[in-house]
Amino acid sequence: MKIGVNSVLFGAFDMDTAFKWTKVCGYDAIEISAIGGMSEHLVLDSHWRKCCTAIKKLIKEYDLPVQAMEQPSQDPKIMKLAFQAAAEIGCPVVNCGPGGKMGDEATFQQSVDSLGKLADLAAKYGVTLCAKAHVGAAIWNTPTTLKLLEAVNHPNFGLDMDPSHIYRANENPVDAIAAVISRIKHVHIRDCKGRQQGPGEPCNQANGRGDIDLLGYIRVLRKYNYDGPIDLEVIGTKGKGYELPACVAIAAETKGHLTACLQAVGER
């Protein structure tokens, strides 16, 4: 398992800052944020190739591969740019949002149809598209995830497993893994306090600060021989005005927790 940081943690700062401090904190890799409004790291517009040139330079400078990209929209035009950019920088996984509304069967089917077509598009560029259960969306818990995975049984589509959303769907993330392990291609990891809809304050999303049994979660991933990427995804630092030292502290604290968990399960 390679551990990284989604650059959205450093959304108020430039890409060089995100790469530099992810490397300083000792991570294996980085996930590039293409989340409009939360970062300006990979901007998917007519200048995306210029962004990719800068990213490739940073990959080499910091010896830090890009193991995933997060781009929440399912707009085919935006996703095509995301897949092109991923292929350009050697990024194997593109994570997007599940779409739709919780409890709305019509929008669930729309999500299924959309993700199936996007998986076909991902295949053309040799990358894997992932989506995750997201509280408030059409796919929000394990049962709806299983329905999605059954409907979109595509070699270029997989599950982005996020324990914080499963926890806030009133499930135990440790118990939820077994049902979906064969389709997990990426893990977004973070902690949270309580089962409210949002993940809470950015500082409390650092692993070990909240209520989720993340050691148990990683132990089960190890049990089933998961060997894919794990990326810390902390949102809200830009909007909350977090200064750089606070963002670095979140990354460093989580790195220590993740390393201890991996050592405890015999992964490192």
Image: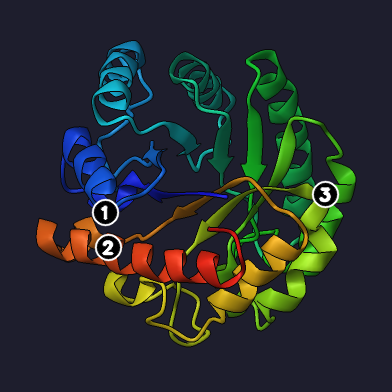
Q: Tell which circle, 2 or 1, labels the residue nearer the N-terminal end.
A: 1
Looking at the picture, does residue 38 appear above or below residue 32?
A: below
Residue annotated with mark 2:
252
Say above or below: 111 vs 267: above
Q: CA distance from mark 3 to mark 2?
A: 34 Å
Q: Amino acid at mark 2?
A: Ala
Q: What is the C-alpha distance between the residues marked 2 and 1?
A: 5 Å
Q: Secondary structure at mark 2?
A: helix
Q: Is residue 14 above or below residue 251?
A: above
Judge by depth and name the residue closer to the eye, 245 or 121.
Answer: 245
Instruction: Pinpoint residue 137: horizontal percent, then vertical percent.
Output: 62, 60
Local crowd size for mark 2, using a 10 Å CA cut-off: few (<14), some (14–19), many (≥20): some
Q: Give the image location of residue 114, x and y in percent.
A: 71, 35
**Quadrant position of residue 202:** bottom left
SS class of the residue under badge 1?
A: loop
In which quarter of the view is residue 63 placed?
top left
Q: Nearer the viewer, mark 3 or mark 2?
A: 2
* Residue 185 place in picture, x, y as percent: 67, 45
- The reply to whether the C-beta atoms of the residues labelled 2 and 1 are less than 8 Å apart is yes
Report which residue position mark 3 lands on: 149
Q: Residue at x 25, y 36 (%)?
A: 40
Q: Which residue is mark 1?
A: 25
Q: Earlier in the sequence, mark 1 or mark 3?
A: 1
Amino acid carrying mark 3 in the image: Leu
**Closest to the observer: 145 or 210?**
210
Q: Nearer the viewer, mark 1 or mark 3?
A: 1
Residue at image point 61% right, 67% down: 218
**Residue 239 position (above or below residue 217):** above
